[in-house]
Amino acid sequence: MNQGNAVAVVTGGASGIGAACCLELARRGYKVAVADIDEATAAQVASQINGVAFAVDVADEISVEALAQRVERALGPVDILVNSAGVIQVPLSPETLPMSSWDLVVRVDQRGTYVACLAFGRRMAIRGSGSIVNIASIAGMRSMPLHSYAPAKAAVIAMTECLAAEWGRSGVRVNAVSPGYTRTPALQAAIDRGQRDVAALEDNSALGRMVEPEEIAKAVAFLACADAAAITGVNLPVDAGWLVATSWQTYKGLPGKRV
């Protein structure tokens, strides 16, 4: 793949992890399509990287299919798809979580990821090459009071494995990245409002810190590129060691820094 001619599409590219992925892929020489439901903000990101902004609603398969057609007409066949579009969920008990909220998360995070994989992946399979990276979450790997978001992200991990096997002989690789607590503008705003405890987010990770969006983007770019040519069907946690650290709370917490 000649990165100078290769085309990458990032859904949810207007903000947070998606925007960081756009910047990183552009830095590596890809032509980037910044796709988001917020076209105006997507255009701002695109202007920074000489990319092209596209409006899309991943919850609507007609909108996603139209996106695939529009990107191909404007930039050429798509080599890389990064599925970063998603919505979050407020931690609530099942008794208090409105089904409308549950449905929205599943429709965007789970169904939207699948629809985008299908629209772009089937074209990649026909051409015989392509790489898809789905943004999942550590929430999909552990029990959390996120009764819609966590199962939806677990489904993203499962569909990543299914599609990797389905399209592997057609030259399409499908992988996932599961971010830990990442200092996106949305999370930082919640911290600033006093809705999230920074100490709790940092102390429960092995590295003692949160993840930066750029660190997620670098992992995504690696899985998307030829350096990962033999890697498909994996879910890569990028979580500052949150997954390995939380069980240590049973044993009075993590050891401190050696001196």
Image (spheres, rainbow, N blue to C red):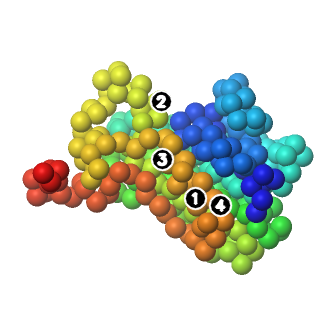
Residue 162 placement (x, y as % from top left): 59, 70
Residue occupying image coordinates x 27% and y 32%: 197
Disc nearest the viewer among 2 and 3: 3
**Looking at the picture, which amino acid does disc 2 mark?**
Pro
Number of the label disc, if any, that sits on residue 222: 1
Q: Which residue is mark 4?
A: 225
Mark toward the start of the polypeptide (2 vs 1): 2
Mark 2, residue position: 185
3 or 4: tag closer to the N-terminus: 3
- The residue that mark 3 highlights is 215
**Disc 1 versus disc 4: distance between alpha carbons?**
5 Å
Q: Position of residue 177 (x, y in %)?
A: 51, 56
Q: CA distance from mark 2 to mark 1?
A: 24 Å
Q: Residue furthest front?
A: 259
Please tell me which of labels 2 and 3 falls first in the chain: 2
Q: Is residue 123 left or right of residue 37?
A: right
